[in-house]
Amino acid sequence: MSNNSQDVFRAFRRFGHFSRRLAWQQPQPPHHHGQARLLRVIADQDQPTSAQLAEILDIRPSSVSELLGKLENAGFITREQDPDDKRASRIQITEAGQSKLSEAEKAQTDFADQVLAGLSDEEQQQLLALLNKANDHLAETVKDIPDDDQPPFGFEGPHRHHGGPHGFGGPRGPRGFGGDGPHFGREFPRF
């Protein structure tokens, strides 16, 4: 790795660090990782099944089922048996779910505006082009790596895509909240 590459990578990490700190200071979290994303997909699809959602989001069906249960209990979705397949349910966003989704997306937009306020529109476009170029290269690089159940870099555990050995958020528990970390007992409000 060249000195230039190291400096860029350190700057990315520092940007991520400060962005997370800013997120903690928001009166309302900018997003609720899985639920807002799932609501967006449900809103965009024509009454998808949980299997379709798992495929679209590239997450385990059991994770989708858990999130759907929470959304249904909160009144943000409804599930009705698929008339063509009695084993499947069709999922639809409710008016309350659409309202919550709009609220979450506005919070995300406001947060992104705040994070990138130090860059002009032109600089944001340049950054976007560079990040897209780097992402395209990474996508090509990882396409040849088999997508099996072996976690990268020696991590163990079922949630390799979501924070390493302890699932979402690492050793402090789900999404980094709870446990004995610096934010013990603090959780973002849930939908």
Image: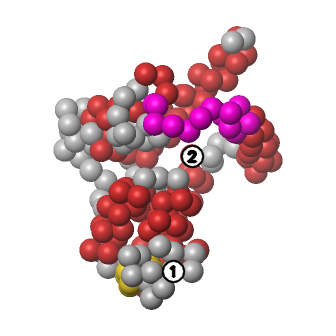
Residue at 45% of width from left, 88% of height from top?
83
Residue 129 on image: x %, y %: 79, 43
From the viewer's perspective, is the residue at label 1 or at label 2 nearer? 1
Amino acid type assigned to the residue bearing label 1 in the image = Gln
Q: Give the range drawn in magenta.
A: 139-151
Determine which quarter of the picture holds residue 89: bottom left
SS assignment for the magenta stretch, majority: loop
Image-based side of 169 in relation to 55, left or right = left
Question: Which residue appears at 38% of the width and 76% of the height?
Answer: 87
Residues packed near mark 1 inside 10 Å, few (<14), some (14 to 19) or many (20 plus)? some
Its colouring scheme is secondary structure
Residue at 39% across / 40% down in the picture? 159
Image height of 175 relative to 10, above or below: below
For the point 43% across and 41% down, the residue is 162
Residue 27 in sight from this viewpoint? no
Residue 115: image tag = 2
**Residue 42 as seen in the image, left or right of residue 100:** right
Density class for disc 2 (Cα within 10 Å; few <14, some 14-19, many ≥20) is some
Q: Is residue 138 left or right of residue 22?
A: right
Q: Tag 2's secondary structure?
A: helix
Is residue 149 inside the magenta stretch? yes
| Quarter assignment of residue 146 | top right
The residue that mark 1 highlights is 47
